Amino acid sequence: MRVIVFALNGCPAGWLGAYGNDWVGTPNLDRLASEGVTFDRHISDRPEPHAARRAWFGGPGKKPTPPPPLPEGKGEESQHTPITFDFAQEASPKFTPFPSGTGVGGLGSFARTVLVRANHPDTDAPPSYYAGWGEVFDARPRPDDDSPLNELLRTFPALLDRLADVPDFLLWVETDRLIPPWDVQQDVFEAYLDEGEDEEPADEHAGDDEAEEPDAEEIDEGDEGSADDEAEEPDAESPEPPVPEEPVPPFADPPTGPFDRSDPDAWDYLHRTFAAVVTKLDAELGRLFEDLRARGLDRSAAWLVTSDFGHPLGEHGQIGLHRPWLHEELVHLPLILRLPDAEQGGRRVAGFTQPPDVYPTLLALVGAAPPAGTNGFNLLPLARGEAPASRTFAVTALELGGAAEAAIRTDEWALLVPVRVPDGDAPRDPLLFEKPDDRWEVNDLRARNIERADELEAKLRHEMQETGPAAQ
């Protein structure tokens, strides 16, 4: 089996049409979803780049230390007892993919593995991550390119030609296209600025039609004057032609850190910029997808699209990875699997999945079994409708910037529990949101549902103690 993976780092699921977004144009990813299986609740176990890479390739998870027992008799009047986990790094931070080497149980089951780095060097993984690949192919952005993916678009066909005779390969493409600073195409951005077009998705070539010259027939239909009229001298009192307005530049480099959510203009400016970047990325992916189809790899290969984390854009008062606030925009990631010949095309899987599931699924595509103790589940039975989801909830944990937080999501609730706050920060109370109604997690219901929040926190403590995130 040939497998092609696109890791769109920093991509939140909520910005794609396949996940319900109705104002950002992503026609190529939408088509991919219609031909593939969309996993609706793919929740990160640790939403940051290095942890995601470890999860994708069967790396050992971070085992939290046992938390203290819950106090007896907690109720509405009791004080919240902080949850305590050990988020320290393992003794050795090095991680090499494919830990089993070759043969059954490792990604060496593929005849060839190729990692394509279509990212800037400052978003690289540690060197140990690249050691296990058969080939690391650089398609890095060039300073004079119009887009960070121009080099990938130029070199991708030749790379596919080199793999044409390889029966089983893993081609893994990583891009930081959605991580600021962004290269924003001005005409796409301006299409999103046009309030009159808010309900229409922008197109890669938005604005091109307006720039075309009208044909002669169109001119004649709107012209009721005579040729003599056209030859007359203009009235001396005619107003001066309007001065063209300066184009509005996009918000291309928003700083990581706090964001004033109460400023609607800044919010709108930031989100329309990101919409333009997402639409342009979708158009570039469309060109790559066409290259795959032209070589018959839509019939002989499985394609997978996912992300390491969702880049926050002010939804809860921060931009980027500033605090480990485990809200929807950070932890809900895309996962779309297109099987050869669009098998199971259009299927949606509602059960919880997490990044550690990618590793056993890749192995299953080549008929290999994961090593004993692998922290994840093979998703092919779900993709083919042969089995229910293995998880009934998802646990997430993250340490970032001196703060730490843990969260649990079930069919009906999402509970976010602060573990530690950095010095000088105001403490953040636990938060409880109703699911799926409160998709974007804006209405904290914990004060009215203390008993339910305590039950979920007990479950969260137990799972973190027994297995760590993602192994439910």
Image: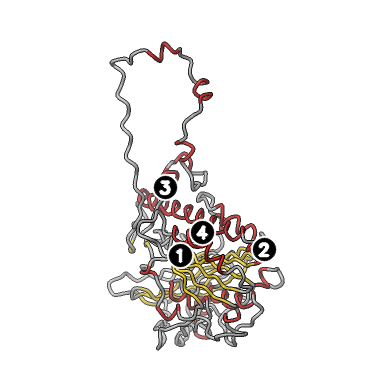
Name the residue type under label 4. Gly
The residue depicted at 30 percent of the width and 70 percent of the height is 425
Classify residue 301 as left or right of residue 172: right
Res 100 seen here = yes
Near mark 2 (Cα within 10 A), the count class, few <14, some 14-19 or many ≥20, is some
Task: Kindly indicate whether the residue at mark 4 contacts the one at mark 3 (C-beta within 8 angstroms).
Answer: no
The residue pinned by badge 2 equals: 299
Q: Amino acid at mark 3?
A: Phe
Quick one: quadrant of the N terminus?
A: bottom right
Residue at left offset 39%, top offset 56%: 145
Task: Relative to 92, say whether 326 is above or below.
Answer: above
* Circle nearer the N terminus (1, 3): 1
Find residue 150 and report its horizontal and vertical position in percent.
Answer: 44, 57
- Binning the other alpha carbons within 10 Å of mark 4 as few (below 14), some (14 to 19) or many (20 upward) gives some
Pointer 1: residues within 10 angstroms few (<14), some, or many (20+)? Answer: many
Q: Is 471 positioned to the left or the right of 399 in the image?
A: right
Determine whether, in the image, residue 142 is placed left or right of residue 455: left
For this orientation, the residue located farthest to the right is 386
Circles 1, 4 touching at the beta carbon (< 8 Å): no
Quadrant of image for the C terminus: bottom right
Q: Which residue is mark 3?
A: 189
Report the residue marked by disc 1.
175
Could you say where residue 279 lies in the image, as x and y percent from the top left? 48, 52
Q: Secondary structure at mark 4?
A: helix
Name the mark nearer the viewer: 4 or 2.
2
Question: Which numbered disc, 2 or 1, marks the residue that appears first in the sequence?
Answer: 1
Does 40 appear above or below 71? above
Alpha-carbon distance for marks 2 and 3?
35 Å
- The amino acid type, in three-letter code, at marker 1 is Thr
Foreground of the two, 202 or 66: 202
Q: Which residue is mark 4?
A: 14
Nearer mark to the viewer, of 3 and 4 = 3
